[in-house]
Image (cartoon, coloured by chain):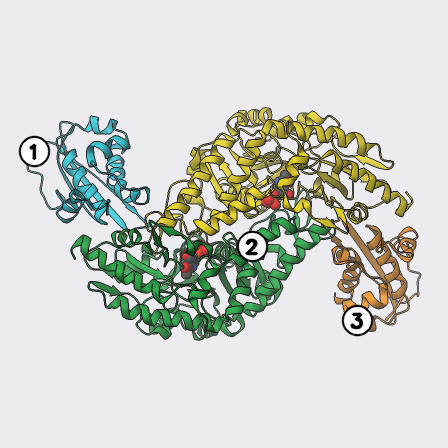
Chain colours: A green, B yellow, C cyan, D orange
Amino acid sequence: MFEPEEIRKDFPILQRKIGGKEIVYLDSGATSQKPKQVIEAISKYYETNNANVHRGAHTLGDESTQLLEEARETIAKWIGGKSEEVIFVRNTTEAINLVAYGWGLDNLKKDDVILTTEMEHHSNIVPWQEVARRTGAKVEMVKVTSEGLLDQDNYKDKLKLKPKLVAMVQVSNALGTINPIVEMTKQAHKIGALVLVDGAQAVPHMKVDVQKIGCDWYAFSGHKMLGPMGIGVLWGKKEILNKMSPFLTGGGMISEVYVDHSTWTELPEKFEAGTPNVAGAVGLVSAIEYLDRLGIENVREHDKWLTVYGLQLIAGVEGVEILGPRDAELRSGSISFTYTGVHAHDVATVLDSQGVMVRSGYHCTMPLHNKLGVVASVRVSFNVYTTKNDIDRLVEALLEVKKIFGK
Amino acid sequence: MFEPEEIRKDFPILQRKIGGKEIVYLDSGATSQKPKQVIEAISKYYETNNANVHRGAHTLGDESTQLLEEARETIAKWIGGKSEEVIFVRNTTEAINLVAYGWGLDNLKKDDVILTTEMEHHSNIVPWQEVARRTGAKVEMVKVTSEGLLDQDNYKDKLKLKPKLVAMVQVSNALGTINPIVEMTKQAHKIGALVLVDGAQAVPHMKVDVQKIGCDWYAFSGHKMLGPMGIGVLWGKKEILNKMSPFLTGGGMISEVYVDHSTWTELPEKFEAGTPNVAGAVGLVSAIEYLDRLGIENVREHDKWLTVYGLQLIAGVEGVEILGPRDAELRSGSISFTYTGVHAHDVATVLDSQGVMVRSGYHCTMPLHNKLGVVASVRVSFNVYTTKNDIDRLVEALLEVKKIFGK
Amino acid sequence: MDIYKEEVMDHSEHPRNQGSFDNVLIKDGQVGQILEGRDSNVSCGDMVQFQLRVEDGKIVEVKWKGVGCAIATASASKLSEYLKGQALEDVREMSEEEMVEKGIGFSVNPGREKCLMLPVKVVRKILES
Amino acid sequence: MDIYKEEVMDHSEHPRNQGSFDNVLIKDGQVGQILEGRDSNVSCGDMVQFQLRVEDGKIVEVKWKGVGCAIATASASKLSEYLKGQALEDVREMSEEEMVEKGIGFSVNPGREKCLMLPVKVVRKILES
Ligand SMILES: Cc1ncc(COP(=O)(O)O)c(C=O)c1O
Ligand SMILES: Cc1ncc(COP(=O)(O)O)c(C=O)c1O
């Protein structure tokens, strides 16, 4: 295990004080903070190697191309894929849209079923609704149990509808639930569905191996895993990516352009039109190296420890109702709750006045909140720099809510 | 006017030596170098304000939201638009794809004409070929004269086909040609076409005012105008953006999500799904401030001076044939040429061995190169840090080509 | 905390004019019409519906309902009190700023502006339609 | 400059086996077939076409044409010399690395790899189809 208090020293923003108080940043699920190593890697790239990627023209161009391709290899190794299967995108949302446009538009037709779940982030719902609108396909959702787990009986029932695609989240950003995606992927494949996994909240906290998961596509964002904004990854199986249409088109992804038609390059460039965000890829590599140094198993242990400690303390606050499963083995990264009689937004404002930063609202999971009958919730979410002290300060600050709202 | 030798001091990468030689970076058309002010603005953002944008939850979130919205205002003011008309994208290519998917798919039908030009970058050709493929519309191209200008007679003829859209470049990245887009936009509007302008090579070098141009959409990239990679802008007229379908969908751009449908937010968020690249927007603002301090008129003067000086010296080298117009008033940002008997790629390699970095190839304008009957060309391109000395070093290095190839 | 002033807390805990005309039968011979609209803030999950009973171009009664935070609730409550008795035309001509100033009477930091403004947006939506 | 060695310059200025069989009539009774393929590198505008005349599983003649830089030209020229006389099967089993090593015999820095490899890609394409 590592010492989070030591790790905090790597994060310049955590040294900031607001209103005289040290920052307690418990909104890592929205975006993580960045260690100085990542910030410096970006600066260093711009100060030393910056160029567009096109081999052969000059030294800086070669260096930039090499950095981008090394980034691809590092990421591929990190998640267990091949390097040409790693496609750089802006974020998880774009990754999912790429599949929706590049695979969905061509492969779905009227009355085909797209199966997603009630606990998806909007980014894994709305693109499928849009594809459904354009193709006549239908979106179905696997139900969530009152405990906050995917209802596996309901999943089996929905699989009888013979969906062409199962699109599901590995770790819920609103409940923290870790879904049994290895088993679920197996079942989906048995009936011939392809499987897309939204790994936005998994990659920052646990070892991910796309081969072991067995899925067909895996999407995640750099900015939630200590990396920079503006860079994310879609991983996909080579055979499937090869058969897909390109999504964004233009410079960089074409082989030959004629007046009336064009031909595409090979993977992965086929899906990367325009100037790529090399600085972003370099920053993401630095984030992976950071996590690797800590050891991703240790990161998961730390996260589990925080979940246990947090669940215990937060649940003990009068008026608080925890959402999602109680078993820390089944959760990761965050704890969401409601506060009886006080709107989540007001709770967040009071906490903020104490220097404690959490998120309040739907967390982009409106169908889930509707299902749970919860208008809005408060979410506290972690990363490697989160400490016991952060949780203690949170609980202290929650007592302020009672003072102000008298509830 | 400003002193480019002074400006160079702001660019850390230009202090680098390769093989003992100072860098002569003449590939700014591919991507510009970044001043330390921009690099520091990005670092400072990550060190001080980094958070996801969602107002109300906490101080860092409010600060990030405010920075993103201020960036939008700065950019709007800089190009003469309204701030809700500024949509953040990754780069010019994505901006054009947004229009192709978000407007083209819904508004074009069989046999409709999309008019583009022979001098477009692939990013303003291939998305239209794709829309044409999906809708049955046809792509037509305005011819380029042997001097490297858009053939205005041919343009008038093509307008008789009643195109629904004219998509054209303001400044050619391969020829340097500045097109008369104000007049051309007027003519297009007269026959009811909408106009998209690719401003990737214009924005870094001259004052751009979308109101004066009168176009309906304007696209550009941050990374070519001293800003970071991974951020670009699509500007569009409010009335038109309002009528367009969203492109990428997911978190951030929806108002309400239900199991079976969703509703969109207002401009500009409607077009910005997922976590935005706030650090990129902050870096872009810093780049605009940098250009503003120099004075964009001075930037244009400097560029024109370099063009005059460069044309004169480069054209004087034995074996060199300049592409594009000879009048510096009609050009900006770059000079492309061929070297008789030696392939552009070999020229670039020889130049690189002398520390002079240029680009060789098609420059993503294959139809243009086919038209001109040129297999590949060498392009030298400028920005504010380019000096007379850079051109002198280029010409010296060109003499090496003769030494090695004996031509 | 500045934001949760006494007046805000009073209105959020005892909201005025809450309810709807949905189950109220407009009596025979009673002139007037009911204008209504709703809107929501996705990020905080707030939803507000306003109904204005109008007679001879004047707002004679206001009912609103919704789910929301303390700020949105207090804002809706105060706005409902203000609107009662106003001429439709006068309200239609007010800017958003005026409506906040005269109709709500308290302000919040930029972070919570959306909560404050939700009832204002709903009322403007009703008047513009 | 390392990259433009004498051998490279010689082959790029005097390329061997350039041309095509397109206007050559295969004489009556002459056994064999002509395999052909082409490919291009978009970034540098290089295009290379290879034709292999095969008799009894053996490459008896090679012609190539194309537009390209000195590296691609020298690479195609050297490869064409090497291929002549080889058994189709043997070439089919070679890795790309082997083909460069034995068939081309010179190397370049990573930046120019694509130019060097273009003829290799074309030949592999022919053999795989
Ligand atoms: C004229 C023109 N249009 C479009 C582009 C594409 O820009 P980006 O690669 O940033 O999407 C470029 C840059 O190469 C360009 O020069
Ligand atoms: C589970 C999940 N999916 C998708 C997303 C969208 O990620 P991004 O905003 O980086 O596209 C998020 C982040 O909010 C998430 O938590």
Report in which chain the residue with disc 3 lies: D
Label 1 sits on residue: C30
Corner quadrant of residue B23: top right
In this picture, residue D44 sits left or right of residue C123: right
Amino acid at the residue labelled 3: Met
Total marks placed: 3
Tell me the CA gap for discs 1 and 2.
73 Å
Q: Secondary structure at mark 1?
A: loop
Identified at 57% across, 64% down, the residue is A75
Q: Position of residue B173 (x, y in %)?
A: 67, 38
Between A36 and A226, which is closer to the camera in this rendering? Answer: A36
Viewer-side residue, B220 vs B109: B220
Task: From the image, tell me which residue sits under label 3.
Answer: D94
**Image quadrant in which the N terminus of chain A is located:** bottom left
Mark 1 falls within which chain?
C
Is any atom of residue A395 visible in this view?
A: yes
Q: Give the x, y percent position of residue B235.
A: 50, 36
